[in-house]
Amino acid sequence: MFSDPQFWVAVAFFAFIAAIFNPIRKILATNLDAQIKGIKDKIDEAENLKNETQVTLSEIKQRQNDVQIEIKSIHTEAENKVKQLEEIAETKLKDQITKRQILAEAKIDQLTRDANNVIQSHISSTAIAATISIIQQKLNSQEQQKLIDKSIQELGSALKN
């Protein structure tokens, strides 16, 4: 058996494998450890990114809730402002209507007084003209002179009082 070349080839082969196995095992272990470490680093990085995105997502949701609350607040405030402005406008409109109504009533009263004055003036002038016409037709010149003298005396006594 020791003289058989196949035996020595097998022994040399196993010795060679045994001699190479330890360095190859170290190289393979080192490479595998490096790959494992790289994979672990990538997993850790992915977990960190996941955590960061969850934090960012929760911040965005919180901001969105805050914005919704602010929108509701602004909407409520705007509605209140609109109601307030409507009330102010309604009050001003009522005041203007009241003022215009008062002015219109004052104008109507003034026009009524003016119309009454014109009518009284017309009635007076018509009555005076009719009286003059009647007096001229019925009184002679001597009676007219007596009537004028009497009117002057009455006017004089009325002025003295």
Image (spheres, grey):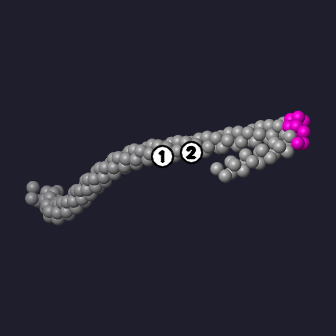
Rendering coords of residue 128 (x, y %): 81, 40
Assess disc 2: are there few (<14), some (14-19) or many (≥20) residues with their C-alpha within 10 Å of its C-alpha. Answer: few
Rendering coords of residue 115 (x, y %): 72, 40
Residue drawn 28% across the image and 53% down it: 55
Looking at the image, is mark 2 or mark 1 earlier in the sequence? 1
| Residue 153 visible to the viewer | yes
Image quadrant in which you'd find residue 18: bottom left
The kind of residue on which mark 2 rests is Lys
Evaluate if marks 2 and 1 touch, with contact meaning CB atoms under 8 Å apart. no
For the residue pair 55 and 40, the one nearer the viewer reads as 55
Residue drawn 40% across the image and 44% down it: 76
Mark nearer the viewer, 2 or 1: 2
* Residue that label 1 marks: 88
Q: Which mark is residue 138?
A: none
* Residue that label 2 marks: 99
Image quadrant in which you'd find residue 127: top right
* Span of residues in magenta: 134-142
Whether the magenta-drawn stretch holds residue 136 is answered as yes
The kind of residue on which mark 1 rests is Ile
Q: Decide: is 5 above or below 98.
A: below
Residue drawn 62% across the image and 43% down it: 106
Whether the magenta-drawn stretch holds residue 117 is answered as no
Question: SS class of the residue under badge 2?
Answer: helix
